[in-house]
Image: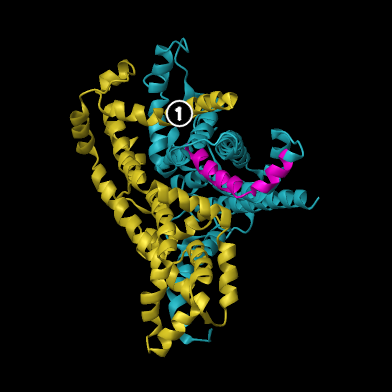
C-alpha cells in the first residue's frame, strides 16, 4: 500500500510538471505582451512589465484586432446556426420519410465525409469569383448548409431517440410537417445540436486556408487571417505588440473554454466510443 | 413511415442544392482545371486543355516528393510523440490500483491547446523560437542549458521537429481523452481474470488492453493521418510562408497553396490537390487493411 502512495505522489508531481510545460508558451506570451520591445530584446523574465497599454496603442494603430474578432464571430455564429438547422432538417427527412434516392444520398454522405476539404478549394475559389462572391463571407458561410458529417451524426441520434408515435399523434392533431420539425424534432435533437455546434464553431473559428484564399480586404479579415497578416505588418517590429495581438486572439477562447470544458470533453469521450 | 412524402424533397432541397453547387461542383471543377494550364484569371473560358501533362509533371516533380516526405516525416514524428504521451496518460488514469484523482481537471488542461487557433500558435512560436530575441533561447541561456543561441528555425531538422512537437503539444490532449474513454470502456472482468491467472501488468496490457482498444486506435490513427497529410497552418506561418528553411517545411498543402494562389498555377495546383487526395485514400486504405488483417489472425 505504501509503495502505491509513494508512486502516486511522484505521478502527481510529474502530471503537474506536464501541465506547467504545456502552459509555458502561453505564460511567455502573456508576460511579453506586457513588456516593451527593448525589454523583450534584453531577455526573458518571469515578472510582467508595465507596457501593456503602449503595446495596445501600437497594435491597434496598425491592425484592428477587435474587428477581426467580430468578423470571426459573425462567420462562426452564422456557420454554426446554418449547419445545425439545415443538417437537422435533412436528417429529419432522411429518418422520417421514405423516398427515391434516399440511399443514394446517404451513401454519398459517407463517401464525402472522407474527402479532404482541400480537394475542392481551387474550384470553390473559381466558383466564388464567377458568382461575384470573392472577398465576401458567402463562400465561407453558405457551404455550412450542406455538412454531411453533421447530418450523419443527427441521423444516428434521431434513429435512437425519436419516438415515431409522437409524430403520428401530431399528424392526427393536424400539425403540419414543418411545424412538427420545429416543435418536436428540434427540441429532441438539442443535445446533439449542442455537441456538434461546439465543434462546428471551433472549426470555423480556427479555419485559416479558406478565408485566406477568399478574403482580400483587411477590414473583412477573420482572426486567423489577421494573425497571418500581422507577421508582415509594421507591428512585427514591436515584439510586445505582436505578443499582445496573439494574446488577444487566444485568451478569450481560453476563458470560454473554462466554462464549457466539462461539456466539450464529455462530447469527445462519448463521440469516440460510439464512432 | 410516411411513404414517398413529397415534403421530404422540400426538406432535403437546401442541403442537396448547396451540396451540389458548393461541394460537388468545385471538386469536379478542380479536376477539370487539373487537365488545363489555367492561370486562375478569366474563368473557365481561359483554361487551355493540356490533357494529363500536369499529372506527368506531378509524378516527376521532385518538389512534390520532397513535400510528401516532409509531410510524412513531420506527421510520423508528431504521431509517435503524441501517442506515447496520450497512451501513457490514459494508462495511468485508468489504472485500477492507482485510482488517480482529478481526471476531469487534467483532461481539461491537457485539452486546452486544441481549441486555440493554429495560426496564432504558429505566429507565437515564430517569435518564441526566434534566434536572437526568442524567449526560448533567452530562457535556456539564462538557465545555462545552452552556451549560445540555437537557430531553431534555420535548420531543417530542428524546424521539422519543432512543427512535430508543437503539433504533439496541441493535440495529445485530444488523443488522451479518446484513448482514456476507450480504455475505460473495456470490461474489468478481463483484468480480474488475468490477475487470477497471474498475468503481470505487461501481459494484460498486450493481451487485453491493446486488442480491445484496436477500433479506437484505428480511429485515432485514421483521423491523425487525414489531418496530418493536410498540415498547412503551422508550417505556413512558423517560417516564411514558403516552407523555409531549405524547403523542409514545404508540406503538400503548402505546396498546393503556393502553386495555385502565389504563383497562379491553378492547373498544377488542382493536380496537386488530386495527388493529395489519392495519397490520403491510399494511406487510409492501408491502415484499415493492416489493422483488419491483424484482427482476423
Q: Is residue A172 left or right of residue B54?
A: left
Q: Chain of mark 1?
A: A
Please name whichever residue, B117 or B188, is drawn nearer the observer in this view of the structure.
Answer: B188
Q: Residue sitting at 73 percent across and 48 percent down?
A: B290
Q: Residue sitting at 18 percent across and 29 percent down?
A: A54
Whole-percent x and y of residue A189?
Answer: 43, 67
Picture quadrant where residue B13 is located? bottom left
Q: Is residue B135 visible?
A: yes
Chain A, chosen colour in render: yellow
Q: Is residue A142 left or right of residue B274?
A: left
Q: Which residue is mark 1?
A: A16
Q: Which residues are magenta?
A: B170-195
Whole-percent x and y of residue B216?
Answer: 62, 49
Total marks shown come to 1
Image quadrant in which the C terminus of chain A is located = bottom right
Whole-percent x and y of residue A238?
Answer: 27, 27
| Vertical relation: B163 (above or below) B183 | above
Q: Dot 1: within a 10 Å radius of its alpha carbon, few (fewer than 14), some, or many (20 or more) residues?
A: few
Q: Residue sitting at 45 percent across and 11 percent down?
A: B148
| Vertical relation: B120 (above or below) A18 | below
**Which SS class for mark 1?**
helix
Please name whichever residue, B94 or B130, is drawn nearer the observer in this view of the structure.
Answer: B94
Picture quadrant where residue A244 is located? top left
Please name whichever residue, A130 or A225, is drawn nearer the observer in this view of the structure.
Answer: A225
Image quadrant in which the N terminus of chain A is located = top right
Whole-percent x and y of residue B195?
Answer: 71, 38
As for residue B188 lying within the magenta part, the answer is: yes
Chain B, chosen colour in render: cyan
- Furthest residue in direction front, as rendered: A1
Which is the main secondary structure of the residues drawn in magenta?
helix
Q: Is residue A238 visible?
A: no
As for residue A122 lying within the magenta part, the answer is: no
Amino acid at each position: 500500500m505504501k509503495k502505491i502512495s509513494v508512486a502516486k505522489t511522484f505521478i502527481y508531481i510529474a502530471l503537474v510538471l506536464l501541465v506547467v510545460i504545456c502552459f509555458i508558451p502561453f505564460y511567455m506570451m502573456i508576460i511579453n505582451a506586457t513588456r516593451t520591445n527593448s525589454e523583450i530584446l534584453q531577455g526573458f523574465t518571469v515578472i510582467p512589465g508595465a507596457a501593456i497599454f503602449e503595446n495596445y496603442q501600437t497594435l491597434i494603430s496598425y491592425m484592428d484586432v477587435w474587428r477581426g474578432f467580430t468578423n470571426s464571430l459573425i462567420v462562426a455564429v452564422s456557420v454554426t446556426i446554418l449547419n445545425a438547422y439545415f443538417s437537422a432538417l435533412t436528417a429529419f427527412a432522411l429518418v422520417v420519410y421514405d423516398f427515391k434516392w434516399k440511399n443514394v444520398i446517404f451513401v454519398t454522405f459517407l463517401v464525402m465525409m472522407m474527402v479532404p476539404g482541400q480537394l475542392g478549394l481551387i474550384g470553390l475559389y473559381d466558383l466564388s469569383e464567377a458568382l461575384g462572391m470573392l472577398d465576401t463571407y458567402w463562400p465561407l458561410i453558405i457551404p455550412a448548409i450542406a455538412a454531411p458529417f453533421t447530418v450523419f451524426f443527427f441521423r444516428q441520434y434521431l434513429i435512437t431517440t425519436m419516438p415515431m408515435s409522437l409524430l403520428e399523434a401530431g399528424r392526427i392533431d393536424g400539425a403540419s410537417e414543418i411545424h412538427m420539425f420545429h416543435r418536436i424534432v428540434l427540441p429532441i435533437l438539442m443535445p446533439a445540436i449542442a455537441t456538434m455546434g461546439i465543434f462546428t464553431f471551433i472549426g470555423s473559428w480556427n479555419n485559416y486556408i479558406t478565408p485566406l484564399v477568399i478574403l482580400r480586404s483587411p477590414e473583412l479579415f477573420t482572426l486567423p487571417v489577421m494573425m497571418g497578416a500581422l507577421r508582415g505588418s509594421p507591428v512585427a517590429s514591436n515584439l510586445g505588440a505582436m505578443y499582445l495581438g496573439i494574446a488577444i486572439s487566444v485568451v478569450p477562447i481560453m476563458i470560454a473554454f473554462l466554462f464549457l470544458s466539462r461539456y466539450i470533453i464529455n462530447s469527445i469521450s462519448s463521440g469516440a466510443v460510439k464512432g | 413511415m410516411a411513404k414517398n412524402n413529397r415534403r421530404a424533397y422540400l426538406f432535403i432541397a437546401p442541403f442537396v442544392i448547396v451540396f451540389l453547387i458548393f461541394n460537388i461542383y468545385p471538386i469536379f471543377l478542380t479536376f477539370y482545371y487539373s487537365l488545363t494550364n489555367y492561370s486562375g484569371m478569366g474563368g473557365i473560358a481561359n483554361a487551355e486543355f493540356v490533357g494529363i501533362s500536369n499529372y506527368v509533371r506531378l509524378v516527376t516533380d521532385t518538389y512534390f516528393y520532397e513535400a510528401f516526405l516532409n509531410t510524412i516525416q513531420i506527421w510520423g514524428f508528431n504521431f509517435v510523440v503524441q501517442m506515447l504521451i496520450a497512451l501513457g496518460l490514459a494508462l495511468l488514469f485508468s489504472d485500477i490500483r492507482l485510482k488517480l484523482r482529478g481526471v476531469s481537471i487534467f483532461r481539461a488542461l491537457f485539452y486546452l491547446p486544441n481549441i486555440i487557433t493554429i495560426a496564432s500558435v504558429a505566429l507565437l512560436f515564430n517569435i518564441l523560437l526566434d534566434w536572437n530575441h526568442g524567449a526560448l533561447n533567452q530562457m535556456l541561456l539564462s538557465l545555462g542549458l545552452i552556451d549560445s543561441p540555437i537557430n531553431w528555425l534555420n535548420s531543417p531538422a530542428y524546424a521539422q521537429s519543432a512543427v512535430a512537437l508543437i503539433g504533439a503539444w496541441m493535440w495529445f490532449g485530444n488523443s488522451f481523452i479518446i484513448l482514456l474513454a476507450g480504455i475505460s470502456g473495456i470490461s474489468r472482468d478481463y483484468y480480474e481474470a488475468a490477475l487470477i491467472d497471474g498475468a503481470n501488468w505487461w501481459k494484460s496490457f498486450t493481451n487485453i488492453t491493446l486488442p480491445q482498444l484496436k477500433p479506437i486506435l484505428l480511429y485515432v490513427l485514421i483521423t491523425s493521418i487525414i489531418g496530418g497529410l493536410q498540415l498547412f497552418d503551422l508550417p505556413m506561418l512558423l517560417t516564411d510562408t514558403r516552407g523555409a528553411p531549405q524547403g523542409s517545411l514545404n508540406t503538400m498543402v503548402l505546396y498546393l497553396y503556393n502553386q495555385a494562389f502565389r504563383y497562379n498555377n491553378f492547373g498544377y495546383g488542382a493536380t496537386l490537390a488530386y495527388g493529395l487526395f489519392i495519397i490520403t485514400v491510399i494511406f487510409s486504405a492501408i491502415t484499415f487493411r493492416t489493422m483488419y488483417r491483424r484482427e482476423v489472425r
